[in-house]
């Protein structure tokens, strides 16, 4: 069952019922100001940091769900309704929500009145613009009341939710132009030099800024007293819960349309220039607010800003495009994969409907992997991101597991000890260099542990990352796991028995025994990139030594990491195998099959193919590949968090969407295009749109997890949007299935596609040249390039050498 459809020309998902299984959201903003907006107008805004500078309030776990947002109420006679249905839930005659790139347009109709709310954050500005247009579709004149409503958050979202004894006395607002312009200025009198403005471009009938006055005693936003009475109270908040609400009376002739522009903005003043007059007079310096207001006070200006935003996305999405007989593939590659990658770049794992924006900072490994998805779109920002991440690294090469985006410092609450982290830095750096050819990044002076007095060049950071694994090996010569590797929940040194202890920080950060085969695979795969980088720098001896270390690891995996039909997952503290025939539960795990095959361990001896067959036999389900089988049915103190989840959820045998592409990529290594495709499409949003009632999260983006076959709600997804799945699925489909892959010295084209796909064309910008690529697969192959022509000239192999100076080349590939 579907709740809408894709509109590819408009680059939108069109939701046609407000009763989606879960709120289906979108993100507005791409620089400093961000808003989350759901299909019913729920959500909130923040400036830069979702925890520290939150403009509007959101209540998690609210009843009904998603019942706070930036709302518009219409009172038409006795009927009160919202264009997005919530929160009045008045039945609409028509409803539609179009989520596009950086904007959302919600349209509702009731009693021959059409209301459309277009919401976006203008590129280059720190505000959300809402253009509300009303159209009278009846044959008689209509007069209605329009009320706006936002609830301000007192900036620090965590404090806002907990510290009521203080917060109920600090709230302050300032009102201008009889309520047309409302400033929320809590704490501006003391140490804040920022305030929020909420303004509309026309004079108002009245306004409200105090929530209780607006809603009424014990009122709720599904039926505010002020809206019911059709009259604002001109309340001025003092403490309690400040809001912003405007009241506009609108008269429309038959067929007439009028638009009103509301702007919610963030204004920051220099400390010495905070006030007009004496501070004790309490009048904020509103110069910048005034300027912002003027930037959007007509429809023409809003249209212009909206077009600039569209242009921004046209440009971003022009660097990689595909055209094939598979409509859904094209849709995903050209729009939604890349869009989700940009959102994970902006948000990391901070703010979604599953991440509260007050929790974790930026993950070290998460941020390194996210790079795969956006390095081709914004290489300069990718460069900056890599160096930011590296600057938090410890001098011994280990890493803080997370860092804070605002301070860019490592987060000591969680500390270090996730032994895969350092290797992800090599992975991210390699992706950057392959994309850009910019080796100068290696020379950047980069701090250790954010200490400006302790710096090395970035090359040295990579060296210590590699060496960290070399010097942290266990009894089987495999890498020590530390607190965990990619699987945060495989906590082999933790041994926690008290409820509430954090699996990620309790216990020693490393034990002498517990080892990870997964990290071994990573070490080999990304170690090869390190070797390439060393060779490029002419460090041949060091390259040779690194190759030897890789060969040793390869031997260790073949000796102690192979279980006969698949790769073992790990060794626990007692030296027992995890992910082996010998185990009763957790016999086989997905992660080492993905990474060890990508690292081609035992490829020529058939180990890779055997591992892929085992995955298919033991982990496959119709909704994707589960993380392990059989699930853990009781708590295992020696395994940690993984066994804390009920069977089928999260890391305990859920379908973890992040590592399904690992298997799909691994299948391209063994050349099975049909299977790589099957794995790709099974979790791909556009391909599972038809089961939205089962999947439940947004059908245009990936979620972190889908409940596995052992869970009661098999097929139900959770935690949409902010997941490493975004980058990996795009990497898989673009670089391994379509096979268009940047390499150190050129662009590789090596498709591994289903045999029914008879070819495709793609456009790829790469190091200043546009490649127009035509792949022909008349023979129905799954892999293997027979012939490749570059501007008509046949070349040997499948790597197109750099086309220095050429703006465009045509490439023909025959499979
Ligand atoms: C989750 C993981 C997450 C980790 C760190 C665990 O509870 O299951 O998916 O990465 O916490 O926040
Ligand atoms: C989510 C985390 O953000 C990611 O770093 C981790 O690898 C997965 N969970 C799996 O545990």
Image (cartoon, rainbow, N blue to C red):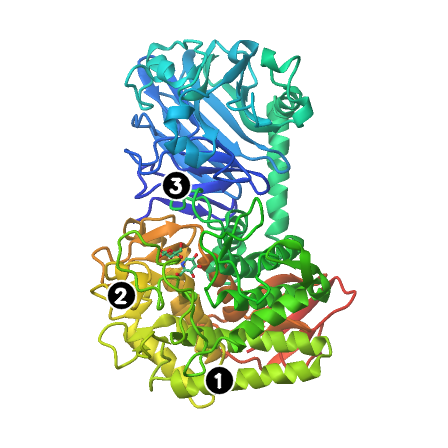
How far apart are labels 2 and 3 at the CA level?
Answer: 45 Å
Q: Nearer the viewer, mark 3 or mark 1?
A: 1
- The residue that label 2 is drawn on is 637
Q: Where 35 sits versus 514, above or below? A: above
Q: Where 31 sits versus 572, above or below? A: above
The C terminus lies in which quarter of the figure? bottom right
1 or 2: tag closer to the N-terminus: 1
Within-10-Å neighbours for mark 1: few <14, some 14–19, many 20+: many
Residue 813: % across, % down: 60, 75
How far apart are labels 1 and 2 at the CA level?
Answer: 30 Å
Q: Nearer the viewer, mark 1 or mark 2?
A: 2
Whether the residue carrying mark 1 lies under 8 Å from ligand 2 is answered with no
| Element assignment for label 1 | helix
Classify residue 784 as left or right of residue 611: right
Please state the quadrant of the image where ligand 2 appears: bottom left
Residue at 63% x, 25% y is 292
Q: Is residue 674 visible?
A: no
Q: Nearer the viewer, residue 217 or 708?
A: 217
- The residue that label 3 is drawn on is 15
Q: Nearer the viewer, residue 480 or 313?
A: 480
């Amino acid at each position: 069952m579907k709740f809408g459809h894709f509109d590819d020309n408009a680059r939108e998902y069109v939701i046609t019922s407000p009763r989606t299984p879960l709120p289906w959201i979108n993100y507005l903003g791409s620089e400093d100001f961000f808003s989350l907006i759901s299909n019913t107008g729920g959500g909130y805004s923040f400036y830069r940091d979702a925890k520290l500078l939150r403009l509007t309030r959101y209540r998690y776990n609210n009843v009904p769900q998603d019942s706070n947002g930036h709302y518009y109420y219409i009172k038409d006679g006795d009927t009160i309704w919202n264009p997005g249905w919530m929160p009045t839930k008045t039945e609409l005659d028509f409803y539609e929500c179009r989520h596009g790139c950086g904007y959302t347009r919600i349209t509702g109709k009731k009693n021959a009145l059409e209301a459309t709310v277009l919401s976006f954050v203008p590129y280059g500005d720190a505000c959300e613009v809402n253009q509300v247009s009303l159209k009278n579709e009846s044959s008689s004149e209509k007069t209605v009341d329009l009320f706006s409503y936002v609830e301000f958050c007192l900036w620090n979202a965590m404090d806002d939710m907990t510290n009521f004894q203080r917060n109920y006395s600090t709230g302050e607002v300032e009102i201008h132009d009889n309520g047309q312009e409302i400033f929320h200025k809590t704490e501006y009198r003391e140490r804040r030099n920022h305030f929020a403005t909420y303004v509309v471009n026309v004079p108002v009938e009245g306004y409200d800024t105090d929530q209780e006055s607006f809603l009424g005693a014990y009122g709720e936003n599904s039926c505010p007293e002020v809206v019911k009475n059709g009259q604002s109270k001109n309340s001025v908040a003092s403490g309690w819960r400040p809001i912003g609400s405007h009241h506009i009376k609108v008269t429309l002739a038959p067929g007439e349309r009028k638009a009103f522009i509301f702007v919610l903005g963030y204004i920051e003043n220099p400390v010495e220039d905070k006030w007009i007059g004496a501070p004790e007079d309490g009048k904020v310096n509103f110069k910048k607010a005034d300027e912002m207001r003027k930037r959007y006070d007509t429809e023409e200006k809003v249209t212009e800003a909206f077009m600039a935003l569209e242009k921004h996305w046209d440009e971003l999405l022009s660097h990689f495009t595909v055209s094939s007989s598979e409509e859904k593939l094209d849709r995903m590659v050209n729009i939604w994969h890349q869009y989700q990658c940009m959102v994970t770049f902006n948000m990391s794992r901070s703010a979604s409907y599953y991440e509260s924006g007050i929790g974790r900072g930026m993950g070290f490994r998460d941020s390194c992997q996210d790079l795969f998805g956006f390095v081709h779109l914004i290489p300069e920002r990718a460069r900056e991101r890599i160096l930011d991440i590296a600057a938090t690294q410890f001098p011994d090469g280990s890493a803080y597991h997370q860092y804070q985006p605002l301070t860019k410092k490592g987060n000591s609450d969680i500390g270090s000890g996730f032994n895969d982290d350092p290797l992800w830095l090599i992975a991210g750096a390699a992706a950057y260099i392959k994309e850009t050819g910019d080796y100068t990044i290696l020379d950047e002076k980069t701090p250790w542990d954010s200490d400006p007095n302790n710096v090395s060049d970035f090359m040295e950071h990579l060296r210590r990352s590699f060496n960290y694994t070399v010097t942290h090996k266990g009894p089987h010569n495999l890498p020590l796991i530390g607190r965990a590797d990619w699987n945060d929940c495989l906590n082999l040194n933790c041994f926690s028995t008290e409820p509430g202890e954090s699996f990620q920080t309790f216990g020693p950060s490393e034990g002498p025994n517990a080892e990870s085969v997964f990290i071994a695979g990573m070490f080999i795969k990304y170690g090869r990139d390190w070797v390439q980088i060393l060779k490029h720098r002419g460090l041949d001896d060091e390259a040779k030594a690194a190759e030897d270390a890789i060969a040793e690891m390869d031997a260790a995996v073949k000796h102690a990491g192979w279980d006969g039909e698949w790769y073992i997952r790990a060794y626990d503290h007692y030296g027992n195998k995890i992910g082996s025939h010998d185990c009763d539960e957790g016999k086989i795990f997905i992660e080492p099959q993905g990474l060890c095959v990508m690292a081609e361990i035992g490829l020529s001896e058939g180990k890779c193919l055997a591992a892929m067959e085992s995955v298919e036999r033991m982990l496959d389900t119709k909704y994707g590949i589960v993380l392990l089988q059989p699930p853990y049915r009781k708590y295992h103190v020696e395994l940690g968090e993984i066994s804390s989840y009920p069977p089928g959820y999260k890391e305990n045998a859920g379908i973890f969407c992040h590592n399904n592409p690992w298997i799909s990529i691994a299948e391209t290594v063994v050349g099975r295009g049909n299977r790589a495709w099957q794995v790709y499409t099974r979790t791909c949003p556009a391909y599972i749109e038809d089961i939205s009632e089962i999947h439940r999260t947004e059908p245009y983006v990936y979620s972190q997890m889908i409940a596995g076959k052992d869970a009661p709600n098999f097929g139900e997804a959770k935690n949409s949007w902010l997941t490493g799945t975004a980058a990996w699925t795009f990497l898989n489909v673009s670089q391994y299935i379509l096979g268009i892959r940047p390499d150190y010295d050129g662009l590789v084209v090596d498709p591994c596609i289903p045999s029914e796909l008879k070819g495709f064309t793609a456009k790829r910008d790469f190091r200043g040249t546009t490649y127009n690529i035509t792949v022909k697969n008349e023979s129905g192959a799954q892999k293997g390039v027979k012939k490749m022509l570059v501007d008509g000239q046949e070349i040997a192999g499948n790597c197109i050498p750099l086309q220095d100076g050429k703006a465009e080349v045509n490439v023909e590939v025959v499979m």
